[in-house]
Amino acid sequence: KAGVTQTPRYLIKTRGQQVTLSCSPISGHRSVSWYQQTPGQGLQFLFEYFSETQRNKGNFPGRFSGRQFSNSRSEMNVSTLELGDSALYLCASSPTSESYNEQFFGPGTRLTVL
Amino acid sequence: QKEVEQNSGPLSVPEGAIASLNCTYSDRGSQSFFWYRQYSGKSPELIMFIYSNGDKEDGRFTAQLNKASQYVSLLIRDSQPSDSATYLCAVNKGAQKLVFGQGTRLTINP
């Protein structure tokens, strides 16, 4: 069974631009969570989608948004990029919402904002 | 006070010894607890989860939970150099989200 895939793996943007990251969950998994990982703040929850609905959102500004499609694939968008948005963005999928014991992470997208 | 706290380390343990990793959490309503291992440059990988007070063993790994003390730990027996990684403690407070600690960097010395 294929794992969680994320595209692109690396991205370089400049301040003020916007970016869209993609996540394809494991086949059969309907929940996708997004996290931001930085050396200073660690791994922080961004949002979770289940059956195309956002179930919860972390403490991030409205510049961070996401959506989920009917095939469970998810995208997250960051508008008006800031230097502090440089991070590893991880998505994780699980069969249902809150089935964290069956949650698997993708390889991440490394975003650098210049 | 952070919601989930871990010593950042580094924690250095000789090969073959027991590595003990600790985590405390602030919300008494927390329901489930997870340990992830993250190798440098890789994504986190779930290695243990525990829901009830007491010990849970899986191979060389033992998770221990004490809800009264709001404390969860991970023991790694017979530590191997391949166990060198950052270990992340995560807590499910409900409301569809996991809260992670900062992680403890563990080094196993041959």
Image (cartoon, coloured by chain):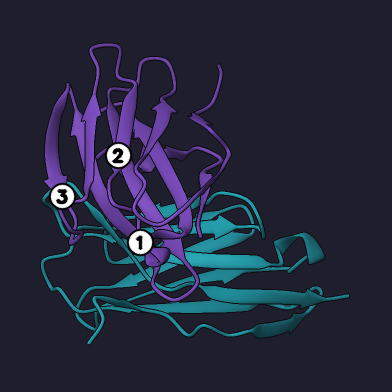
Chain colours: A purple, B cyan
| Mark 1 Cα-neighbour bin, 10 Å: few <14, some 14–19, many ≥20 | some
Q: Quadrant of residue A81?
A: bottom left
Q: Is A30 located above or below residue A82 in the figure?
A: above
Q: Residue at x 50, y 72 (%)?
A: A39
User: Can you give x and y, in whole percent of width and height, for residue A44 in the image?
Assistant: 33, 61
- The residue positioned 15% from the left and 73% from the top of the image is B27
Can you identify the residue that label 3 sits on?
Answer: A57
Nearest to viewer (mark 2 / mark 1): 1
Residue wearing tag 2: A77
The extreme top residue here reads A71
Query: What quarter of the picture does the C terminus of chain B occupy?
Result: bottom right
> Which chain does tag 2 point to?
A
Q: Is residue A47 left or right of residue B88?
A: left
Where residue A70 appears, as percent x and y from the top left, is 23, 12
| Distance (Cα) linking label 2 and label 1 | 13 Å
Identified by mark 1, the residue type is Glu
Numbered badge on residue A18:
none
Tag 2: amino acid: Asn
Task: Residue under label 1, please give it.
Answer: A82
Is A84 placed above or below A51 here? Answer: below
In whole angstroms, how far apart are the C-alphas of marks 3 and 1?
20 Å
Where residue B45 sits: x, y (%)? 53, 48
Q: Earlier in the sequence, mark 2 or mark 1?
A: 2
**Pointer 2 or 3: first along the chain:** 3
Asked if residue A97 lies left or right of residue B23, the reply is: left
Q: Quadrant of residue A102?
A: top left
* Chain of the residue displaying label 3: A
Residue nearest the observer in this picture, A52 or A28: A52
> In which chain is the residue bearing label 1?
A
Task: Kindly state the secondary structure of the residue where label 1 is placed.
Answer: loop
Task: Tell me whether circle 3 and circle 1 mark residues in contact (CB < 8 Å).
Answer: no
Q: Identify which residue, B18 or B5, lies in the foreground.
A: B5
